[in-house]
Image (spheres, rainbow, N blue to C red):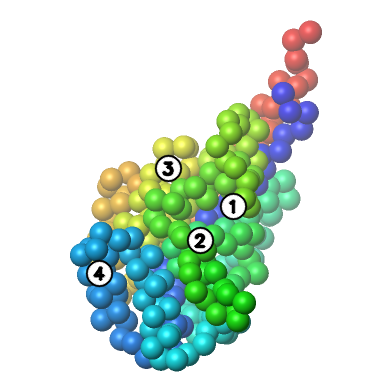
């Protein structure tokens, strides 16, 4: 038995596109740079992925490189980062993280800490330039390899909807670097962030593997939608009725919004659960069989 109770960290894990930001990140950044029309671009990527039986993310990453080449534009890592300034967020996102940190600190009397993680199929180089970057303990997303001229030439890391679950296990087991193996068995009691301490926030069908894993493992899930999209809301309703999402709400991160209240309720429940588990651990320690 561990001498000290340590499972006192809550992880809020977010998808990015459609969850924190209304449009896919490429539409604020790299697509305008190469002058392509987003709907036509995505249609072409999806058509090719279907026809050639390819992964759409890999097709997307290659199409971006090919379009940059055609337009004879050099895009280096810092250019991607600079482009991220154009990303727009749902209302309240920029103040959300510190507000939630303060909420958990207050509710737990400082005994529980909140950490934020981002798992996105989008592009790491763009997210690294996002104004909200500093709030995340880790960002997991697809990444390019940059050659010796500093030009992106090939995918280095690919994140797809099913691969997102790998990162939930990384957070769960405290093996956050992708070079660490996560396959070794680890007792539930030894995992730094048990699934009960996790809330996954997503917006659509691409979040189903992550939501399903989180729910099945005892965690919590929230699905959000853009107020202007009836299709987005219908998807969330479907996710809720299928048992994927505990709660759904409009993607409004401002104080007092339904989303804010529902996430606070989940945090209250987790804070209480942590207090219970801490006490149960202490009682068992005090009364160990001789
Ligand atoms: Mg999304």
Disc 3 designates what residue?
213
The residue carrying mark 2 is 157
Query: Whole-Å distance between the Cαs marked 4 and 1?
Result: 30 Å
Cα separation, mark 3 vs mark 2, equals 22 Å
Q: x%, y% of residue 133? A: 61, 70
| Residue 139 seen in render | yes
Q: Position of residue 244 (x, y in %)?
A: 35, 47
Which mark sits nearer the N-terminus, 4 or 3?
4
User: Residue 235, position in %: x, y?
Assistant: 27, 59
Please report whichever mark, 3 or 2, sits nearer to the chain's N-terminal start.
2
Q: Are marks 3 and 2 in contact (CB under 8 Å)?
A: no
Q: Which residue is mark 1?
A: 178
Mark identifier at residue 257? none
2 and 4 marks in contact (CB < 8 Å)? no
Q: Residue at x 76, y 32 (%)?
A: 4
Mark identifier at residue 48? 4
Q: Establish if 107 lies above or below 279.
A: below
Among the 4 quarters of the image, the one containing residue 21: bottom left
């Amino acid at each position: 038995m561990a001498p000290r109770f340590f499972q006192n960290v809550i992880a809020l894990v977010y998808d990015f596109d459609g969850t924190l930001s209304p449009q896919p990140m490429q539409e604020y950044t790299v697509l305008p740079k190469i002058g392509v029309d987003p709907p036509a671009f995505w249609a072409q990527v999806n058509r090719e992925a279907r026809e050639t039986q390819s992964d759409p993310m890999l097709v997307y990453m290659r199409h971006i490189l090919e379009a940059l080449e055609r337009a004879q534009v050099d895009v280096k890592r810092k250019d991607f980062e600079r482009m991220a300034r154009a990303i727009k967020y749902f209302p309240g996102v920029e103040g959300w993280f510190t507000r939630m940190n303060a909420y958990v600190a207050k509710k737990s009397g400082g005994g529980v800490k909140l950490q934020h993680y981002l798992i996105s199929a989008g592009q790491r180089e763009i997210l690294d330039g996002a104004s909200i970057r500093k709030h995340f303990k880790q960002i997991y997303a697809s990444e390019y390899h940059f050659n010796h001229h500093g030009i992106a030439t090939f995918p280095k890391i690919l994140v797809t909807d099913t691969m997102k679950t790998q990162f939930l296990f990384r957070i769960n087991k405290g093996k956050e670097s992708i070079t660490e193996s996560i396959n070794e068995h680890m007792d539930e009691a030894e995992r730094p962030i048990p699934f009960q301490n996790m809330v996954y926030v997503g917006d659509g069908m691409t979040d189903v593997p992550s939501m399903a894993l989180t729910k099945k493992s005892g965690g919590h899930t929230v699905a959000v939608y853009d107020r202007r999209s009836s299709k987005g809301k219908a998807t969330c309703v479907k996710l809720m009725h299928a048992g994927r999402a505990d709660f759904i709400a409009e993607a409004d991160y401002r104080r007092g919004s339904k989303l804010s209240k529902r996430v606070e309720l989940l945090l209250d429940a987790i804070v209480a659960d942590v207090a219970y588990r801490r006490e149960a651990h202490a009682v068992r320690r005090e009364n160990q069989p001789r």
